[in-house]
Image (cartoon, grey):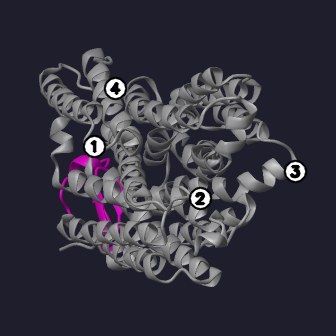
């Protein structure tokens, strides 16, 4: 009876989870178009203000898997509330920041909120009826990507109507409301993984991610051949190797390397990395392209608000497709949906590379981009959750989201290097730089499609008996039940 009561309230649980994920996703990108405004108001330099983004990215990369692991250990609902409180506290500090140092510290605190994604996926898997899992996971995954695009769209109007401080006040209000609702309305998940946090793996994970992301973030400024960049990249490789060795030997590893070696896990993670390369590079550089003065021979001289609106079609189509991807996965298989999404994503990158003389071409490209990414994100998340035991849901989905963020860092750094090469005497990039950059992203999407081909198809009946209660029959005609989760791949 209690189990039935939990399941009947899954709509409320989903609404609360969606609110928390939306607040985190918005904070990923709200500040991106207004960094010059923040730079002027905090009286800092361009190189320093970029750490407002880099610090958030580094913090989120580190805390996402850690918070997912803690949630698996002590309870996903209470840790979900804790991450929202940290996100709200960071937003409050950022809204009140009078110096760039305080702003950067605030962004580090906000990065703890990265844990909302793996925790939300874990709660959904533990609480939702099987027939609702695909749709709910797909919607949350799409919402995380939609929020990143929506933040760029909303930044201009918010700053114009209020000021940049409200880029933090508004998400803080939403986050506090979500935390209160989660505390009272979201049931505590019964699935736990006993153990403790192994701090050596956590520190090594943090160290190699910091080395990698700092190198990639600063490479356009320092130069890819500089000693500092090469040294950091070498350090990242060495520290990552040490991290893997320590994880393999740890009694309670932060991330189970056996899990990460599963074909269904590493292939989906590779796709996530490459899609992250494309998505975040477009979010960062398309507004810059549109804002370029027409005197440069290209661009549209758009305002912050106008350049943000270019990305609105991707936000709409990504969310709409994400909501529908669950049903499509049941019909043609989740692997096929991921592959389709990657193939569709090649088209907008080619449009941005070779057809950007009129704004309608950009609107068309971003609309198609939302379809491709929406399909891939939604189906990929379901495959990851289905590929691991329930107690590893938080860590596996957290690493998948984390790898997408790392891919975004790689994409932004590569795009910056290509776009700024051979700049005009005025300092503005040449149009060819954008053409070559977006063509590179099209190549990344082709590689993502090839990686999607390697994703294994699920087989009916495998582990069903051990995953389900004795009195609950499997339903292979609806799709494969793996680890208690209904996923879209049809039985072979």
Q: Decide: is 368 above or below 190.
A: below
Determine which residue is flagged by label 3.
Answer: 161
The mark lying in front, picked from 3 and 2, is: 3
Q: Which one is earlier in the sequence, the residue at label 2 or at label 4?
A: 2
Res. 488 image quadrant = bottom left
What whole-number distance in Å separates the C-alpha atoms at marks 3 and 1? 48 Å
Q: Few, some or many C-alpha atoms within 10 Å of disc 2 (few <14, some 14-19, many ≥20)?
A: many
Q: Are marks 2 and 4 in contact (CB under 8 Å)?
A: no
Q: Secondary structure at mark 4?
A: helix
In the image, which residues are magenta? 461-489
Determine which residue is flagged by label 2.
Answer: 149
- In the picture provided, is 368 more to the left or to the right than 442? right
What whole-number distance in Å separates the C-alpha atoms at marks 4 and 3? 39 Å
Q: Decide: is 241 above or below 405.
A: above
**How far from the left and from the top, in percent, is residue 72?**
39, 30
Q: Decide: is 210 above or below 308.
A: above
What whole-number distance in Å separates the C-alpha atoms at marks 2 and 4? 27 Å
Q: Nearer the viewer, residue 365 or 200?
A: 365
Determine which residue is flagged by label 1.
Answer: 389
Q: Secondary structure at mark 2?
A: helix
The question of residue 261 being in magenta is answered with: no
The mark lying in front, picked from 2 and 1, is: 2
Q: Nearer the viewer, residue 235 or 301?
A: 301
């Amino acid at each position: 009876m209690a189990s039935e009561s939990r399941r009947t309230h899954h709509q409320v649980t989903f609404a609360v989870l969606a609110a928390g994920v939306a607040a985190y996703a918005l904070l990923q990108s709200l500040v991106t178009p207004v960094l010059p405004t923040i730079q002027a108001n905090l009286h800092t330099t361009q190189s320093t203000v970029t750490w407002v983004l880099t610090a958030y990215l580094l913090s989120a990369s580190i805390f996402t898997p850690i918070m997912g692991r803690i949630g698996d250990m002590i309870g996903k609902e209470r840790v979900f509330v804790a991450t929202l409180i940290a996100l709200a506290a960071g937003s409050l500090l950022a809204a009140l920041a009078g110096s760039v140092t305080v702003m950067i510290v605030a962004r580090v605190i906000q990065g703890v909120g990265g844990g909302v994604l793996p925790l939300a996926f874990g709660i959904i898997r533990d609480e939702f009826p099987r027939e609702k899992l695909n749709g709910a996971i797909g919607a949350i995954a799409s919402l995380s990507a939609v929020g990143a695009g929506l933040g760029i769209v909303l930044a201009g109007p918010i700053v114009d109507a209020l000021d940049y401080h409200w880029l933090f006040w508004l998400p803080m209000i939403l986050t506090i409301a979500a935390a209160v609702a989660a505390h009272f309305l979201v049931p505590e998940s019964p699935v736990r993984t006993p153990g403790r946090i192994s701090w050596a793996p956590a520190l090594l994970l943090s160290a190699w991610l910091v080395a990698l992301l700092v190198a990639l973030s600063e490479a356009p400024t320092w130069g890819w051949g500089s000693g500092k960049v090469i040294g950091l990249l070498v350090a990242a490789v060495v520290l990552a190797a040490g991290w893997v060795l320590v994880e393999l030997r740890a009694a309670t590893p932060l991330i189970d390397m056996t899990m990460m070696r599963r074909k269904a896990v590493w292939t989906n993670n590779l796709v996530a990395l490459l899609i992250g390369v494309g998505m975040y590079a477009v979010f960062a550089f398309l507004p810059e392209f549109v804002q370029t003065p027409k005197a440069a021979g290209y661009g549209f001289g758009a305002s912050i608000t106008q350049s943000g609106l270019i990305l609105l079609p991707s936000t709409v189509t990504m969310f709409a497709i994400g909501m529908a991807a669950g049903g499509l996965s049941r019909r043609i298989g989740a692997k096929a949906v991921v592959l389709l999404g990657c193939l569709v994503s090649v088209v907008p990158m080619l449009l941005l590379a070779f057809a950007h003389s009129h704004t309608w071409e950009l609107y068309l490209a971003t609309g198609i981009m939302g379809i491709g990414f929406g399909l891939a994100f939604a189906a990929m998340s379901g495959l990851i959750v289905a590929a691991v035991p329930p107690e590893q849901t938080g860590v596996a989905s957290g690493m998948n989201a984390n790898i997408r963020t790392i891919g975004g860092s790689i994409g932004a750094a590569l795009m910056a290097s290509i776009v700024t090469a051979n700049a005009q005497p005025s300092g503005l990039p040449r149009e060819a730089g954008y053409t070559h950059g977006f063509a590179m992203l099209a190549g990344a999407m082709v590689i993502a499609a090839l990686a999607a081909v390697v994703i294994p198809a699920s087989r009916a009946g495998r582990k069903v008996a051990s995953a389900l209660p004795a009195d609950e029959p499997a339903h292979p005609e609806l799709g494969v039940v793996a680890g208690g989760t209904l996923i879209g791949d049809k039985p072979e």
